[in-house]
Amino acid sequence: MSKKIRMNNPEDTFMKRQFTYLGAVAHEFYNLPGKYLGSECNEYPNAGGGIPRADIVYHVEMEDGRKFVINVEDETNNVNMDTLKKVYNYKSNIYYKTKYPVISVITTTLPRDWVNCGFTSTDLLRPKIISFPDENAWKRLNSMLDKAKKQEEFSDVEGLELINLPRCCTKDHEKAIELICEELLNLNIEDSYVKNELIYAMQCMIHKYARTDEDILRLEGMIELRQVIDKRSPVLDAMKYECRKEGIEIGREEERNDTLKVLCDLVKSSPVDSTMEKVIGSLGFSMDEVMNADID
């Protein structure tokens, strides 16, 4: 049996990667209010025993100092009253947990005039709706590709815009990802971490729009996805080393405290003489440390 190549729910992964690993950049790109502070949990058990899972939830701070939570839900199907009910449920649970007002955002690849929510003046929920399809998307894409070919520097937000443009195109999505893949590896962007994340996110667009498994593998090769994945190894190795070192240091501190406690007990129960002072010194302590130690 052949191994499945295409990932499940690539658009879902695409959105979550942006806000998980490039949170402040994504917040700026989508032009959402406030200053990005950091992510919030996205699972909220309800009174009925279920665990609704929101797409993206994070904290922001407004200019006046007030704290809000933003909930972004990416919808690839119809945006209708059922969508609003789901988003309102998230809003209620998030507010119950955080006690902060919640700004609801719905992003969709459907044209804006397909969004059928029937808003009225009495609605409890009026989310910000971002519809990606744009008749000028190819014009924007060609302009950004020209900039990339000239090796002009991209900001982090411009880099994120580039890989989001296939979702904005109303036609020729496969051609869009092909052209972006041709330039992405050599994109002039200062932060290598951001560039690597753009490549990871571009993988999602490849899996969404490439026609065949062969196209997926070819395009992943163009952006050198495997090499980017390998670049994570030194980061993970460093993390393992720091965790191991921290564990050793904690163990040494615990061992030192245990030794100090034994010496304290010994000093309290026996007369102090030169032999005991030598033993205490050989273990790396001074008599003052032992006599004045605060050990429970």
Image (cartoon, rainbow, N blue to C red):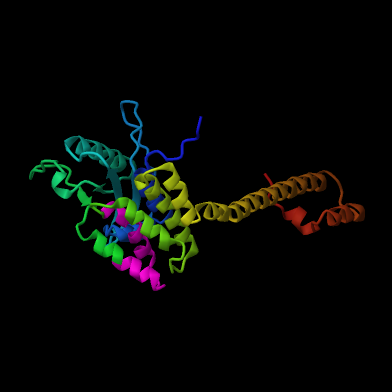
Q: From where the camera sits, is residue 282 visible?
A: yes
In-front residue for pair 169/119: 169
Residue 273 horizontal/vertical position (percent): 90, 53
Residue 76 covered by magenta stretch: no
Tell me the residue at 26%/54% (across/down): 168
The quadrant of the image that shows the C terminus is top right
Image vertical order of residue 23 relative to residue 258, above or below: below
In-front residue for pair 181/48: 181
Most common SS among magenta residues: helix
Residue 3 horizontal/vertical position (percent): 50, 35
The extreme right residue here reads 275
The extreme top residue here reads 48
Tell me the residue at 63%/50% (across/down): 240
Image vertical order of residue 78 relative to residue 249, above or below: above
Residue 194 horizontal/vertical position (percent): 45, 61
Residue 220 horizontal/vertical position (percent): 46, 51
Q: Which residues are magenta?
A: 143-168
Residue 159 covered by magenta stretch: yes
In-front residue for pair 17/200: 200
Q: From where the camera sits, is residue 39 visible?
A: no
Tell me the residue at 24%/64% (across/down): 139
> Is residue 148 rendered to the left or right of residue 91?
right
> Is residue 202 rendered to the left or right of residue 103?
right
Q: Quadrant of residue 160?
A: bottom left
> Is residue 201 rendered to the left or right of residue 261?
left
